[in-house]
Image (cartoon, rainbow, N blue to C red):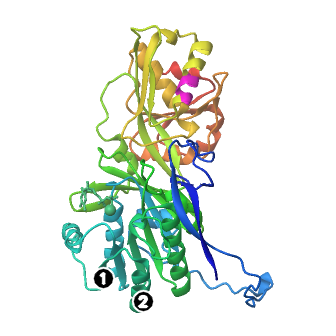
Amino acid sequence: MAKAKKSVFFCQNCGHEESKWLGQCPMCKEWNTFVEEKVTVAKTSSTKSVKESQVVPLSAVKMENEERISTNIEELNRVLGGGIVPGSLILVGGDPGIGKSTLLLQVCQQLEKAEKKVLYISGEESLRQIKLRAQRMGEFSDRLLLLCETNLDIIRSVIEKERPDTVVIDSIQTMYSEDVTSAPGSVSQVREATNTLMQLAKGLCVTIFIVGHVTKEGTVAGPRVLEHMVDTVLYFEGDRHASYRILRGVKNRFGSTNEIGVFEMRENGLREVKNPSEFMLDGRPEHASGSVVACSMEGTRPILLEIQALVCESNFGMPRRTAAGTDYNRVNLLMAVLEKRIGYHLGNYDAYVNIAGGIKINEPAVDLGIVMAIVSSYKNRPVSEDTMVFGEVGLSGEVRAVNMPEQRVAEAKKLGFQTCIIPEVSRESVKNIKGIKIIGVRNINEAIQQI
Ligand code: TYD
Ligand code: MG
């Protein structure tokens, strides 16, 4: 078939295509992300190959018992929806250095312990570097095979020859196909590579994990470009300076995307954190004003976390407000509610709100916690340490119900809290939990009486 070269411009962030260069991507609104790439277009010929395909009624589709392979890493299994579905293509995205290679090497270790044949293909590190990393993580058997390669055609033939159960591609941005003229890491290369891997995964029923770096520079295509092509998208996030990491499901064709997995980076690899609440509350200050424990649901799991606020008089005409780990606009809104409904003059005060540990929470259930932390700092009066707070705050200052109050109160009880301040309307749902004092509040005025 005749082929012609065409020059197009791709947004390296989201993969949006334009025929000319633009300063800002109309899709993802990022600036300076367009890069020119030459693509080969196959000219449509009049004689299309017609392959016979069969249509089937829904009732005739056989349901094989969907088998899942456990990775033996509980936190990962949960995010995947119970385990790996054989033949699926899983993208693991994250900032460079967050621990993607470490996590996947650990997955390889667990799978080869379960007698699976695993192939780890690295385009970033040498065999020696992988070995050095593996030595920190313990024993590996000969069922783990390594390959340092970036040429997709070679990778395809190796996979077809070796027939492993699981393949790890580290990373997709280093892979290239000779059929595509643009440089490795460009949108067309990354798409082509993912397509090839998708065909391999479905055709040979091998599970393929793809590592994708989140990049800020515009020259390397980000993982968002291939999100729509894969079955499952997991993002590995966390503060590089803190030791814990959160694995979040963004897309999953075989399970829910609400779940998170929590890990801690140690010298000998990643360790699962089974009780994230304890981990998040570690190192909480005693008798300090502006510190409140709130509860957020991450999927089916309640996580207790400490909200810190610092409110102090402003030296400038324009007060400073910052929010780390939560929505900045939400904090401004809650401060406006306090000003209007309670009558505090917060306009002359700087306010800094922080969720300790660096976790990001957007659930409205932490509203009441933020309000109480701000008031506690403003009045310089500590909230009792054994009190946990949750509830959504409305614009009239009312405290509204949130979902799953029972689980939240139960988690607080498990961690030894004595009192819970919750929306009055949720009291009925938690009446069966004994041994913890429940204070129901209808509005923020009632809540701040407790400080
Ligand atoms: P890595 O998995 O190489 O990150 P990525 O593949 O996402 O770029 O992780 C690199 C960081 O993790 C590096 O800063 C060192 C640290 N690390 C540990 O703290 N302990 C370990 O056992 C390992 C293997 C890495
Ligand atoms: Mg890596």
Mark 2 and mark 1 lie on one chain; the one further toward the N terminus is 1
Residue 137 coordinates in the image, percent (x, y) = 23, 68
**CB under 8 Å between callouts 2 and 1?**
no
The residue nearer to you, when weighing 191 against 389, is: 191
Q: Is residue 134 visible?
A: yes
| Residue 15 drawn at (x, y percent) | 56, 57
Q: From the viewer's perspective, is 254 left or right of 63?
A: left
Q: Position of residue 384 (x, y in %)?
A: 39, 27
Q: Secondary structure at mark 2?
A: loop
State the residue position of label 1.
145
Give percent across and percent down for residue 333: 58, 24
In the image, is 64 to the left or to the right of 359?
right
Q: Which mark is residue 184?
A: none
Please state the quadrant of the image where ligand 1 appears: bottom left
- Residue 451 in sight: no
- Measuring 19% from the left and 72% from the top, which residue is drawn there? 128
Residue 144 painted magenta: no
- Residue occupying the point 43% across, 71% down: 176
The image quadrant that residue 426 belongs to is top right
Q: Quadrant of residue 314?
A: top left
Secondary structure, magenta segment, majority class = helix
Q: Which residue is mark 2?
A: 163
Q: Which residues are magenta?
A: 329-334
Whole-angstrom CA distance, mark 2 to mark 1, is 11 Å
Q: Amino acid at mark 1?
A: Leu
Q: Nearer the viewer, residue 80 or 231?
A: 231
**Residue found at x 36% / y 85%:** 117
Q: Quadrant of the N terminus?
A: bottom right
Three-letter amino acid code of the residue under disc 2: Arg
